[in-house]
């Protein structure tokens, strides 16, 4: 796993990584967020467990995404971790039991207040419906990632 950018003022980071499964990728990203002090050590297991019960894969077109998140009790400081996968990984589709999608980008959310979750999710889903925005994020360009994530977190 390689750090692409880390903006502690705006509370986001981006990493490029590879993984063999959704659990593998989620674990690596959770560990990155823990390492930056955004979440507790319980976040790792909690986010994997929540993904098993409430999948977050979204088939958005050519570039598919997942938006994993878990309970605020595991969050020290709110943050987003963008995961840019070297190769797509299969995730279960949100609200579609038994359906899978090949995910290339993940937006891992560490949300401290539940009331802030809906607004951020709405902005993220809107951004995820724009394949041009997703292609820019997937490119790994630090400037473009900073621009997109910075606008999401205003």
Image (cartoon, rainbow, N blue to C red):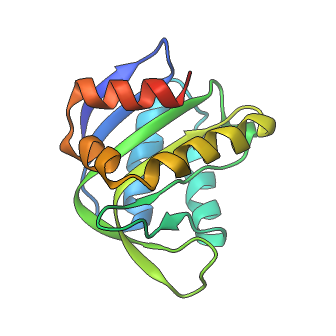
Tell which residue pokes out farthest to the bottom in this image: 98
Residue 73 picture quarter: top right
Looking at the picture, how far across and down is residue 62, in whole percent? 29, 67
Tell which residue pokes out farthest to the top in this image: 9
Give the position of the C terminus as an image quadrant.
top right
Compared across the picture, whether 115 is left or right of 84 comes to: right
Residue at 48 percent of width and 44 percent of height: 30
Note whether 151 is above or below 56 in the view shown: above
Q: Is 12 or 31 nearer to us in this picture? A: 12
Give the position of the N terminus as an image quadrant.
top left
Note whether 153 is above or below 1 in the view shown: above
Q: Please say whether residue 21 is visible from this viewpoint.
A: yes
Tell which residue pokes out farthest to the right in this image: 115
Residue at 30 percent of width and 25 percent of height: 5
Note whether 151 is above or below 65 in the view shown: above
Residue at 29 percent of width and 42 percent of height: 137
Looking at the picture, how far across and down is residue 20, in whole percent? 29, 67
Compared across the picture, whether 109 is left or right of 4 comes to: right
Counting every numbered tag in the picture gives: 0
Q: Is 2 or 14 nearer to us in this picture? A: 14
Looking at the picture, how far across and down is residue 79, in whole percent? 55, 30
Looking at the picture, how far across and down is residue 47, in whole percent? 59, 53
Residue at 44 percent of width and 63 percent of height: 23
Q: Please say whether residue 42 is visible from this viewpoint.
A: no
């Amino acid at each position: 796993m390689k750090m692409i950018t880390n903006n502690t003022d705006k509370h986001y980071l981006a990493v490029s990584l590879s993984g063999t499964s959704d659990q593998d990728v989620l674990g690596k990203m959770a560990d990155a967020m823990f390492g930056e002090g955004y979440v507790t050590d319980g976040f790792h297991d909690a986010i994997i467990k929540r993904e098993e019960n409430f999948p977050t894969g979204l088939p958005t077109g050519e570039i598919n995404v997942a938006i994993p998140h878990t309970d605020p009790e595991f969050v020290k400081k709110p943050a987003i971790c963008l995961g840019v996968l070297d190769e797509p990984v299969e995730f279960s589709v949100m609200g579609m039991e038994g359906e899978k999608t090949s995910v290339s980008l993940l937006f891992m959310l560490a949300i401290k207040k539940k009331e802030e979750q809906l607004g951020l999710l709405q902005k993220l889903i809107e951004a995820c419906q724009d394949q041009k925005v997703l292609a820019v994020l997937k490119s790994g360009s630090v400037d473009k990632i900073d621009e997109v994530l910075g606008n999401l977190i205003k």
